[in-house]
Amino acid sequence: MDFTISPQLENLRRRIADFVAREVIPHESDPAAYDAHENIAAPLLARLREKARAEGLWCLQLKPENGGLGVGRVGMAVCYGEMNRSIFGPAVFNSAAPDDGNMMVLEAVGTADQKARWLAPVARGDVRSAFVMTEPHPGGGSDPAMMLTRAEKQPSGSYRIYGRKWFITGAEEAAHFILIARTSDDPRTGLSAFAFHHDAPGWRIVRRIPIMGPEEHGGHCELEFDGLEIPPQDVLLAEGAGLKVTQIRLGPARLTHCMRWLGLAMRCVSIARDYAAVREGFGVRLADRESVQTMLGRIAMEIEIGRLLTMKAAWELDRGGLARKEVSMAKVKAANTLHLAADTAIQINGARGYSKDTVLEWIYRYARQARIVDGADAVHEMVLNRFLEKEADGFWSWPVADGAAGEPRA
């Protein structure tokens, strides 16, 4: 792949970086900028969103006809890291999870009517959304084949939903939901995907699950379904296509997590470098100590490895591939890199890093979930081993351009 980017994309990246530095990061030091769950407060978020929209920095991930900028996955990889130099950044640009992944899957699989009803309000920023898949034991988590929530088809053609879900990100503030439920026992076509609105009867939020935090808007909730009725026009793709919808959604959504996490990792390095440049001990600046230099050098290398894996996966998605192997590698690497970057930056900052005088402790608590959400490290490593068993030495093959065998390629 070619790692050069267009002047237009570089201009967009610079504009996003400038907006984050100018409009977003200064609010991180203001206690009034946070809501009760340690995310950006709603009034401030609304003001910053209007500014981002006015500057043409809104919804990069969607095509222009759906209200976005249409930069593609590679363009997102370039820009999302700049967005997440601030802990508030992704929400400001309407590129935060779970809305980000929900918008992309609705754009990919929704009918014109479904896009108008379920996608457009989220793309405009009028409502938030949630993706309802994970279940308590013994239900489905990383293995969707274990899913117990069922959708019972009625004589009218509608479906009634019964079951329980948990750790549903954003559920408390979401208006639009995408639900995965079982419609048959077939191992490949037994799941279906449905859209429903918060106001529909037959379901409830059991609790907002307390977490280490900080939390996304709407928290992580446990839901109970006791007869929620969903009409047939709100089935995504088709009955039995739930596993396909899940695969279409989770690959790109996992990758956007990687993009955002690497931005936070770079922010950790910036905070650590700024402090090391001015802090002295025993007559020597921290930045001049070899031990600190090696710590920062290692993190810089780890971030670059994460960026390369993420960019390769984005490139594969843009050229029409599923990128399952590439996304799994990027996800494991980016998650662990963020955790290491936050830990290292706190160590260099000492007590200052452990305090709330910087956002490092916020990032550190947030970073621990990265190795769990959207598939734990061990699950993705297991997936990679399956590819290794199947492909053997071909695991490391390069894509070959079209051309006659034996001809040199530029």
Image: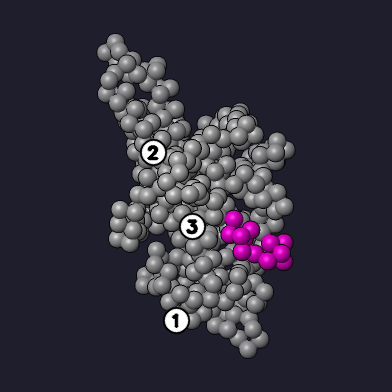
Above or below — where is 355 with respect to 113? Answer: above
- Identified by mark 1, the residue type is Asp
Residue at figure coordinates x 43%, y 77% from the top left: 187
Q: Nearer the viewer, mark 2 or mark 3?
A: 3
Q: CA distance from mark 2 to mark 3?
A: 21 Å
At 51% across and 67% down in the image, what residue appears? 244
Say few, some or many: other residues with alpha carbon within 10 Å of mark 2 (under 14 / 14 to 19 / 20 or more).
some
For the view shown, which residue lies furthest in the bottom direction?
155
Residue nearest the observer in this picture, 110 or 199: 110
The spot of residue 378 in percent (x, y) is: 31, 56
Where is residue 264? Give x, y as percent: 46, 38
Dot 1 and dot 3 residues touching (CB under 8 Å): no
Q: Is residue 68 visible?
A: yes
2 or 1: tag closer to the N-terminus: 1
Q: Secondary structure at mark 3?
A: loop
- Graded by Cα atoms within 10 Å as few (under 14), some (14 to 19) or many (20 or more), the crowding at tag 3 reads some
Q: How many marks?
A: 3
Q: Which residue is mark 1?
A: 185
Mark 3 residue type: Leu
- Report the Cα–Cα distance between label 1 and label 3: 25 Å
The residue that label 2 is drawn on is 305
Q: Earlier in the sequence, mark 1 or mark 3?
A: 1
Based on the displayed image, in which of its 4 quarters is residue 279 positioned?
top left
Does 238 appear above or below 385?
below
Comparing labels 2 and 1, the label whose residue is closer to the camera? 2
**What residue span does the magenta drawing correspond to?**
104-116
Q: What sort of colour scheme is used for the picture?
A: one colour
Residue lying furthest top in this view?
Answer: 283
- Depth check: 177 or 222 in front? 177
Reading the image, the residue beneath label 3 is 322
